[in-house]
């Protein structure tokens, strides 16, 4: 892909496609069944947040959770991409947070309603810088970690994804065209938890890329 900066993939990005419960330990920690096929939802691109800006609590939320995820940036347009060709469609990577208003999500789950507001308010997708595809030789063997105020809360490995990145690209594109600049959030490992105003989140993919965000204290 032509661009190598966050601002550019935001500009190109038509959509954010996210995967839920893609790590067994995370599905289980929230009392959910391990999925037999990928759970897919979308987030609006207005939810992107770049570093230097605070994460805000959405209205009505008192249980704001962190979820660190490996983000895939789609490098070229494709529809019904075969799994064995999926790697060709990866343009790069980034560290992402799929911030979740867990109380609003729980209420939606109980009522069988969509997760859109609990995952899609402004500032709910903090994102790091674009990582060139070539910088990562094996995206299925990366440490993915998150600290709150210096304390390790999430420390997983992308080897533990239930559905691989190639499988996800193939699965999602069976239904919707993926375009250059679209992103896929590949799900969070275990250790999600609550935050309060003033908390500082640091997260990363091994030592390849690191992000830092604070939670709005106003
Ligand atoms: O809210 C959830 O637990 C689903 C999700 O986004 C994830 O597993 O990354
Ligand atoms: Mg998530």
Image (cartoon, rainbow, N blue to C red):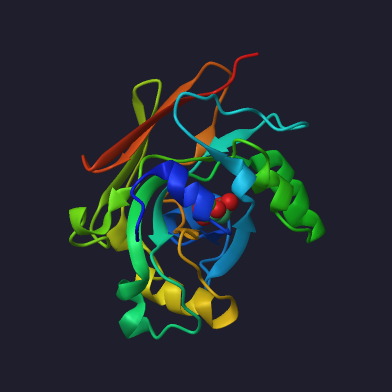
Q: Residue at x 26, y 58 (%)?
A: 133
Residue furthest out toward the front: 2
Q: Residue at x 59, y 79 (%)?
A: 175
Q: For the N terminus, give its image quadrant.
A: bottom left
The answer to whether residue 6 of the structure is visible from this angle is: yes
Q: Residue at x 49, y 20 (%)?
A: 199
Q: Is residue 165 left or right of residue 125?
A: left
Given residues 50 and 40, the one toward you in this image is 50
Relative image position of residue 40 (x, y in whole percent): 58, 66
Given residues 185 and 23, the one toward you in this image is 185
The answer to whether residue 68 of the structure is visible from this angle is: no
How many marks do you count on the picture? 0
Relative image position of residue 198 (x, y in whole percent): 53, 16
Given residues 210 and 195, the one toward you in this image is 210
As drawn, 187 above or below 35? above
Relative image position of residue 125 (x, y in whole percent): 54, 42
Relative image position of residue 192 (x, y in whole percent): 49, 41
Name the image quarter holding residue 18: bottom right
Residue furthest out toward the right: 111
Q: Residue at x 70, y 54 (%)?
A: 115
Given residues 196 and 191, the one toward you in this image is 196
Q: For the C terminus, give its image quadrant.
A: top right
């Amino acid at each position: 892909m032509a661009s190598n900066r966050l601002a550019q993939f935001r500009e190109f990005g038509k959509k954010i496609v996210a995967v839920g419960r893609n790590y067994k330990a995370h599905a289980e920690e929230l009392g959910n069944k391990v999925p037999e096929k990928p759970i897919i939802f979308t987030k609006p691109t207005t939810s992107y947040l770049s570093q230097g800006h605070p994460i805000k609590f959405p209205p009505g939320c008192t249980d704001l959770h962190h979820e660190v995820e490996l983000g895939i940036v789609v490098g070229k347009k494709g529809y019904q991409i075969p799994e064995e060709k999926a790697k060709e469609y990866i343009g790069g990577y980034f560290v992402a947070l799929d911030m979740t208003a867990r109380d609003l999500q729980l209420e939606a789950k109980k009522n069988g309603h969509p997760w859109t507001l609990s995952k899609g308010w402004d500032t709910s997708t903090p994102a790091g810088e674009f990582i060139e595809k070539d910088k990562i030789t094996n995206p299925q063997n990366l440490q993915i970690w998150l600290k709150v105020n210096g304390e390790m809360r999430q420390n997983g490995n992308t080897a533990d994804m239930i559905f691989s990145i190639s499988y996800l690209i193939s699965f999602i594109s069976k239904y919707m065209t993926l375009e250059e600049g679209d992103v896929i959030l590949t799900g969070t490992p275990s250790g999600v938890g609550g935050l309060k105003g003033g908390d500082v989140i640091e997260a990363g993919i091994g030592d390849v890329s690191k992000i830092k965000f604070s939670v709005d204290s106003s």
